[in-house]
Amino acid sequence: MSPYPNSDEDRRLPAVRIIETAPSGMSSGPASELTPLQVALRYKWMILILAVVVSGAMYGGLKFVSPTFVAEADLRIDMPRLRLMNDSSSLLSDQKPSQELLRTEMAVLSSPRLALTAVTALGLENLRAFQLCPRVSWPQALHNLVGRVLGRPAPQPACEVSPEHAAKVLLSALNFTAAREALIIQITASQPDPQLAARLANGYADTYIKWQSDMKAGLAQQADEWLSADLANIQAKMIADDAAVEAYRQSHHLIGLHSKGNGDGAVDTISTQSLEQQNSDLGAVNAALAEKSSILAQVQQALRDGHLDAVAPVLGSQMIQSMITHQAQLSANLAELRANYGSTYPTVVAASAAVARNDAQIRTEIDKIVRGLSSEVAALNERKATVMRQVEGAEKKVAGESEAAVDLSELQRAADTDRRIYESLFVRLKQVDAERRMEQANAAVVVEATPPDFPSAPRKPMIVAGTFLASVGAGIGLAFAREMMSRRFRDTEQVESEIGLPVLGIFPKTRKAPQDIVIDDPFSIEAEAVHGVVTNLLRHANPDGGPLGRVVLVTSSLPGEGKSCFSVALGRTAVRSGMSAFVLDCDLRRPMVERLVAGERRGEIVAPPGNGLSETADIAAEVMHHAGIDERSALRYLSLSRYVDNPHGLMAWSGLSAILTHLRSRYDLVVLDTPPVLAVSDSIKLGSLADEVLLMIDWSATPREAVTSATRVLQRAQIAISGIVMTKVDLRRYARSNSGEGYYLRHYRS
């Protein structure tokens, strides 16, 4: 038999507990439940190895994952737009940006057309990452991975240049996010190369701004072409109207009535001369009104937009221009003083006051000019109304003078109307040219992307740490599942709860022969375990003063559970405790007692060979004659297999009862080492001859079903089991799930 491990570290809990024998079938309390901490401590090395292996594998796998760098550029959105068909004199709208507008611009940013433009502008179709490459089969991918592990470069397949595919790859590498409280769009680019990531973010933002500028320039160009075409049409119509007036005069012989040869159609009468003068005045008023209104509108729009520097050129005021220049100098000086001395320094306060005074003077001067222009426009409107009333009166007079003069006047009116339209379109065309030069892009880059210093993914330390923690959790779960699915008993409380029998003690593993530990190391935990069982069995003295004569049957459910080792150790412990003991090996198939007692000292064993036990009257003499003596402990023993050939014959042999009667009268403790209950029926037949029945359970291997079956077999035979002894107990593992008993060891382990 191989020895059981034993060391000083194994002594972590009391090896036995003194328990009063409970009736068979009664439960001594609920089974102990393992906590996750106890399970983790019990399987700590398995859990730690699993976590280290999985984390190492994850760390090794992350080495083959390309890092991802994220660069971010911020766009500010602003939306001034041209207004071509509006009654307002300004072509720039005052539309305010909104979140809806922001989402619209994000949709524009995500458009494939803009992405295709960015691909062309940045030359991305020439980069391999943006080319259309054939898919790699999994055997080739596996071959490439092995090559990377071995340091061999993988072959690169030929790729196709496709701008459309490059645009899709570009959009997949970009992400657009709108800020919550600001009209800012964040453009983030993710790439394995940090320089390329920053280049993509900045390049896409620049492409978007240029695309907007080109779109606005195209819109202004279309407006210029449209106005120029209309202006040419109106000019042709005006020339045609003048020609029609001249033709009408000639056809109706009204040439001689001209007061002036200027071709204006006015006849040389008082009414026609008056009408001519009034029409001339009306044209002058309209021209002056259009000029003043245009100037006033441009100034007001510049004031609303905050472009004070655009007011001076429109008004042609050198004084305002010089004041604005002086204002810029004062502002620059104030900014420098604030940067050097702060906002509360007296010089800074004085400079700030100077800036405010100069700004107030500029605005006061501009307000004066605006009020003057407004007054002039109002006066011209009143003058226009007066002249138009005069024209209407004169026309009525002319209508009464001659039907021809009336028709000529209508033709002249049409010519004048076309002339006024021509002048208005000409002014509008000049406004388009001026505002096109003032127009700005709808977006601007406020924060440029810079190459990131560290990759954003994969975050190796966090992933490895998370994998380690997850592996530890999974290991604890697996250990818990293994513990819950285990078929063996975990501790004494579980045995007592499920079987309903008391546990008289535990017999730990030892590095030496377990049956010799009570002699070689009598103060060890293992020896104390056997001594505790002896104390439980022989705790009452014989009132007559003679031997106790207790017959203890030792059996087990299955072979190899250490019952023979325990039987010998039990007998030796009783002898060392001052009692007399006799071990009777009743296992005729696989007798082990003589071999365990002799060990390597077979020459020291007194066991003369016998030729069978006879049924004589002096059976005691024959037993003592054939019994062996253990020289190390004076334990007497007898192996019946040397004298009885037929196991079934032993059960029917009446001399066995006589032997037990004789041994009861001579010894305090008689140990019967019997075969396993589930293997043969010998223990059942011998159970009726014993005072106590001990059932051995191998803590490391015996299934709970086998123990349950063995107890049912003995109970059906009406054999009361006195208690259970757990054998081959690993003290270190056992202590992790029985912390209460480990407290005892902290005081007595030395």
Image (tube, rainbow, N blue to C red):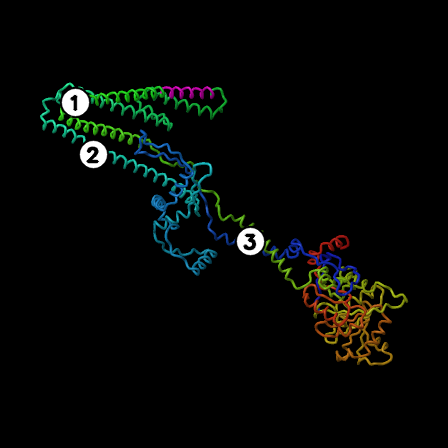
Give the amino acid at mark 3: Ser
User: Whole-percent x and y of residue 272?
Assistant: 16, 21
Q: Secondary structure at mark 3?
A: helix
* Front disc: 1 or 2: 1
Q: Which mark is residue 213?
A: none
Residue 398: which disc?
A: 1
The residue pinned by badge 2 equals: 233
Choose mark 3 or mark 2, whichever is in front: 2
On screen, residue 583 versus residue 3, left or right, reads right
As helix, strand or loop, the secondary structure at mark 1 comes to helix
Q: Nearer the viewer, residue 415 or 106?
A: 415
Crowding near the residue tagged with mark 2, few <14, some 14–19, many ≥20 C-alpha atoms within 10 Å: few
Q: Dot 3, crowdedness within 10 Å: few (<14), some or many (≥20)?
A: many
- Span highlighted in magenta in the image: 348-365
Residue 318 lies in the magenta-colored region: no
* Separation of residues labelled 3 and 2 (CA atoms): 81 Å
Q: Nearer the viewer, residue 170 or 249?
A: 249
